[in-house]
Amino acid sequence: MSTLEAEYRLEYFEEEEGFTRKECPDCGDFFWTRDEDRETCGEPPCAEYAFIGNPSLDEEYSLEEMREAFLSFSRTTTTSGSSRIRWRRIAGATTFC
């Protein structure tokens, strides 16, 4: 286990949400999971992506339809009526809001 083990023991994960922290036997990284049977972290190269060839959407979208759905979901309208997407750097990951 990590020398910072106490720092990673978060009440939210363990008590409120039922997560377990495990170490991946392939890469040695630690990860949180709700799946007691999960062995690896689930990231390449330890595991293949499960969503490739297994779409989560019930219907197909053209590129234009998907782009419009994404933009309509993520738009922030300004007073001038124009729209913008704001990108943030949070915890080492780039996200949009």
Image (cartoon, rainbow, N blue to C red):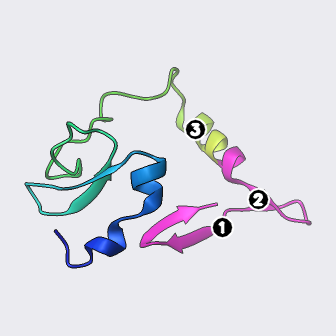
Which mark sits nearer the N-terminus, 2 or 1?
A: 2
Residue visible at 46% across and 46% down in the picture: 17
What's the amino acid at mark 2?
Thr
Q: Residue furthest left?
A: 26
Which mark sits nearer the N-terminus, 3 or 2?
A: 3
Which mark sits nearer the N-terminus, 1 or 3?
A: 3
Residue named by callout 1? 86
Of circles 1 and 3, the one toward us is: 1
Residue named by callout 3? 66
Vertical position of residue 60 compared to residue 12: above or below: above
Question: Dots 3 and 2: beta carbons under 8 Å?
Answer: no
Distance CA(mark 3)–CA(mark 2): 18 Å
Residue named by callout 2? 76
Vertical position of residue 52 compared to residue 8: above or below: above
What's the amino acid at mark 1?
Arg
Of circles 3 and 2, the one toward us is: 2
Residue 82 screen position, x and y as percent: 83, 61
Residue 73 screen position, x and y as percent: 68, 46
Secondary structure beneath dot 2 equals strand
Vertical position of residue 94 compared to residue 34: above or below: below
Vertical position of residue 59 compared to residue 31: above or below: above
What's the amino acid at mark 3?
Met
Question: Dots 2 and 1: beta carbons under 8 Å?
Answer: yes
What's the magenta region?
Answer: 71-97
Question: Dots 1 and 3: beta carbons under 8 Å?
Answer: no
